[in-house]
Image (tube, rainbow, N blue to C red):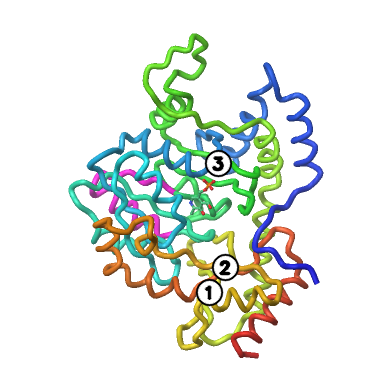
Amino acid sequence: MDRIPIAGPGITQREIDYATDAAANGWYARAGEYPRRFEDAFAKYLGVKHAVSLPSCTSGLHLALAALGIGPGDEVIVPDLTWIASAAPITYVGATPVFADVDERTWCLSAMSVRACLTENTKAILPVDLYGGVPDYSALRTIADEHGLKIIEDAAEAIGSEFDGHKAGALGDVAAFSFHGSKTFTTGEGGMLVTNDDAIHARVMQLRDHGREPGDVQFNNTEVAFKYKMPPVSAAIGLAQVERAEELVARKREIFDWYRRALAGVDGLTLNHEPANTKNTYWMVTAVLDPMLEWPKEKLMAALDTEDIDSRPMFHPLSSLPAYDGQAEAVVARKRNEVSYRLSPWGLNLPSAMNLTRAQVQRVTEIFRRIICVS
Ligand SMILES: Cc1ncc(COP(=O)(O)O)c(C=O)c1O
């Protein structure tokens, strides 16, 4: 029996046709065509004013921080439970990541914990829409408004998700998405920065092209900046994906529903949560087990591996990683972030690839039940 992969895209003839066209024709005067079409379609899908195609989400977060003028001496509050790409760009600009705890149910940034992390140096909050779920953006917006902070939304994993009827990406002042091969929309590698703010957009356009004005043909760089652009072939694939947005997002929700039904009634098992005013797009179906079941994530991953089933560990709290050893903020976070430290050892992502069949989910859930000894 074939190994069941953790993630993978849904590619159709449309992606292949567009990519082929871009490879054949996306050069010279037409080089910008697919990136522009992808940006326009993406902005329209989200209902935002500006979308800028990039080589990655990491570069998008980097540009967002730089465009807001965040730098040395500044602090940015980020959830402890996330991929390191959410926090690394804070270090790129010379600012300090402050690791706040997550909410018990959404696994996303806790507004209460954000309050505990505020100092006079705080400049921004960087919430993460983890695994397709969203934090309480109205509570985060209240804090941001009270303290004059910007919200930089890491929407890498949340294409199509919603809070109060607004799509992920439109929930912060500026946001970034990922089109890594595992994501809901993919371009292989890639990203998109989105914003409704004209000033942020203008600054991003200058910073992403070695510090020259958009349209400059005289190589007149006015500052030292970055080079972050998406190649046309990638953008062509992205355009096809966004044209199939409803289908791809619905598929993610369908896969989650198969898991939810098959694992219903398993004592001590919690799957991704969807609060009433939100839409979760379940980028990764994630299971958190009660410690009483005595199945730490590494052991469970190894057991699934012997059955030819791929899985991934829930993110480790960033403050626990060797990358942040010795940093004062990490030392404080290890004590403060009780929820992140309690959930992470017992959480893992289950196969969530776009082409997963119901029969494969059936196999995963039967083996999962057998392993943890419940029927
Ligand atoms: C939460 C989160 N933020 C940021 C990123 C970075 O995305 P990219 O790999 O496109 O830079 C990822 C990608 O895995 C992610 O999951």
* Residue extent of the magenta highlight: 135-153
In screen coordinates, is 243 left or right of 100?
right
Q: Position of residue 299 (x, y in %)?
A: 55, 78
Question: SS of the residue at dot 2?
Answer: strand
> Is 150 a magenta residue?
yes
Label 3 C-beta lies within 8 Å of the nearest ligand 1 atom:
yes
In screen coordinates, is 25 left or right of 53?
right
Sequence order check, earlier mark of 1 and 2? 1
Q: Which residue is mark 3?
A: 191
Mark carried by residue 298:
1
For badge 2, the amino acid type reads Asn
Q: Residues within 10 Å of mark 3 (few under 14, many from 20)?
A: many
When asked about the image quadrant of residue 41, the answer is top right
For badge 1, the amino acid type reads Glu
Sequence order check, earlier mark of 3 and 1? 3
Sequence order check, earlier mark of 2 and 3? 3
